[in-house]
Image (tube, rainbow, N blue to C red):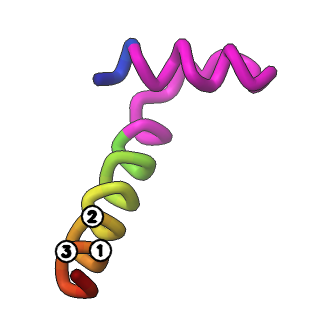
């Protein structure tokens, strides 16, 4: 999943991120949004 995120960020012009904590934060936010979305449906 991390590789896919790296490719997506690159596709949209974001510079490469070398710190893993950035990815951890992105995945935590995605999980949070997924939980919220499941409650709304």
Against 38, residue 16 (above or below) is above
The residue sitting at 33% across, 47% down in the picture is 27
| Horizontal side of residue 7 vs 11, given as left or right | left
The residue sitting at 80% across, 21% down in the picture is 13
Q: Secondary structure at mark 3?
A: helix
CB under 8 Å between discs 1 and 3 = yes
Against 16, residue 39 (above or below) is below
| Horizontal side of residue 11 vs 34, given as left or right | right
Residue 12: percent from the left, percent from the top?
A: 74, 25
Q: How many marks?
A: 3
Q: Mark 1 highlights which residue?
A: 37
What is the quadrant of residue 33 in the picture?
bottom left
What is the quadrant of residue 18 in the picture?
top right
Residue 23: percent from the left, percent from the top?
A: 42, 37
Q: Mark 2 highlights which residue?
A: 34
CB under 8 Å between discs 1 and 2 = yes
Residue range highlighted in magenta: 4-23
Could you tell me how far apart the alpha carbons at marks 1 and 2 are, in whole angstroms?
Answer: 5 Å
Q: Secondary structure at mark 1?
A: helix
The residue sitting at 29% across, 23% down in the picture is 1
9 in magenta: yes
Q: Nearer the viewer, residue 17 or 35?
A: 35
Against 7, residue 33 (above or below) is below
Q: Mark 3 highlights which residue?
A: 38
CB under 8 Å between discs 3 and 2 = yes
The overriding secondary structure of the stretch rendered in magenta is helix
Mark 2: few, some, or many residues within 10 Å (few <14, many ≥20)? few
């Amino acid at each position: 999943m991390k590789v896919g995120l790296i490719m997506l960020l690159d596709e949209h012009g974001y510079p490469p991120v070398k710190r893993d904590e950035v990815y951890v934060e992105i995945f935590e936010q995605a999980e949070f949004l997924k939980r919220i979305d499941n409650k709304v449906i």
